[in-house]
Image (cartoon, coloured by chain):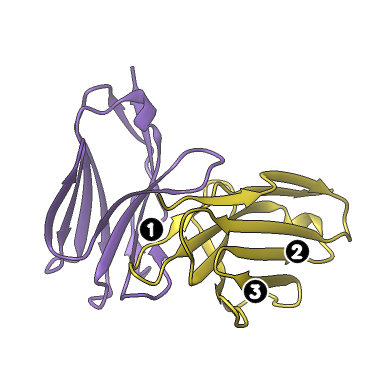
Chain colours: A purple, B yellow
């Protein structure tokens, strides 16, 4: 079993939809959670960084962490074609190497 | 803020030659830098972790004599692929972390093609 599980997709949605991306993990010691967006042939771009259970909002993005269920989510409101990319969740125990999910490919059609 | 650059963005070389890739943190001091490689449609694979002024720590299965890493300053790390072969062709990405917060900022990546 992988430490971090993430559905690879692709996830196809129409423009304006609410997108839900998820990861589950098995290591209860993980304390820090990140979401990265990666466009094709580019490096990952940090979207959200959280370290506690609950929600964190930044513009159209909301990150949700449920440590009791070992489950994290990223919600994208009013999705745009420019949101089409691969979304990677990542986590660690604190100043250690990141453990990544496999990434979910998102396609937002106009 | 938190901008990381890489140079070159792409490189093509002949088999047997060495290639150097630079990673720079432009607006912050990076106490730790990381080197990853990524194959098409796969996630990032950590190759090594380097701290300024000390030897890099390589992940299991990564040949340290083939992938030389130097982290000579708080803003620059280099990865040298020595005696490159076609199987080394990949997308190499660096990231940098400050000492203050536990997150990594990634460079734009370098695409290496070995003929």
Spatial CA distance of label 2 from label 3 is 12 Å
Q: In which image quadrant can residue B10 be found?
A: top right
Q: Is residue A60 above or below residue A37?
A: above
Residue under the image location 26 percent in, 28 percent down: A79
Q: Nearer the viewer, residue B48 or B101?
A: B101
The chain to which mark 3 is attached is: B
**Eyeballing the image, is A68 above or below A58?**
below
Position in image of residue A37 (x %, y %): 39, 44
- Look at the numbered discs 3 and 1 and tell me whether their residues touch, using CB distance below 8 Å: no
In the rendered image, which quarter is residue A30 located in?
A: bottom left
Q: Quadrant of residue A87?
A: top left
- Say few, some or many: other residues with alpha carbon within 10 Å of mark 1 (under 14 / 14 to 19 / 20 or more): many
What label sits on residue A101 in the rendered view? 1
The label number, if any, that marks residue A70 in the structure image? none
Residue shown at 67%/57% (left/top)? Answer: B22
The crowding category of the residue bearing disc 3, from other C-alpha atoms within 10 Å (few below 14, some 14 to 19, many at least 20), is few
Residue at the disc numbered 2: B81
Circle 3 sits on which residue? B62
| Distance in Å between CA atoms under marks 3 and 1 | 21 Å
Label 2 CA crowd tier, 10 Å (few <14, some 14–19, many 20+): many
Q: Nearer the viewer, mark 2 or mark 1?
A: 2
Tag 1 subunit: A
C-alpha separation, residue under disc 2 versus residue under disc 1: 26 Å
């Amino acid at each position: 079993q992988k430490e971090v599980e993430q559905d690879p997709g692709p996830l196809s949605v129409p423009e304006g939809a609410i997108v839900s991306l998820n990861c589950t993990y098995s290591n209860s010691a993980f304390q820090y959670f990140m979401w990265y967006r990666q466009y094709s042939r580019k490096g990952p771009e940090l979207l959200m960084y959280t370290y506690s259970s609950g929600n964190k909002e930044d513009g159209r993005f909301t990150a949700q962490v449920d440590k009791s269920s070992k489950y994290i989510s990223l919600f994208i409101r009013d999705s745009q074609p420019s949101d089409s990319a691969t979304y990677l969740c990542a986590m660690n125990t604190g100043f250690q190497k990141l453990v990544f999910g496999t990434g979910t490919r998102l396609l937002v059609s106009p | 803020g938190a901008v990381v650059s890489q140079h070159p963005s792409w490189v093509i070389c002949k088999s047997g030659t060495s290639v150097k890739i630079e990673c720079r943190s432009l607006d912050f001091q990076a106490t730790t830098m990381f080197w990853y490689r990524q194959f098409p449609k796969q996630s990032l694979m950590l190759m090594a972790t380097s701290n300024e002024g000390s030897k890099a720590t390589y992940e299991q299965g990564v040949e340290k004599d083939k992938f030389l890493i130097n982290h000579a300053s708080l803003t620059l790390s280099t990865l040298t692929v020595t005696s490159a072969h076609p199987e080394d062709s990949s997308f190499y990405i660096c990231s940098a972390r400050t000492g203050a917060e536990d997150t990594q900022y990634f460079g734009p990546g370098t695409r290496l093609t070995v003929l």
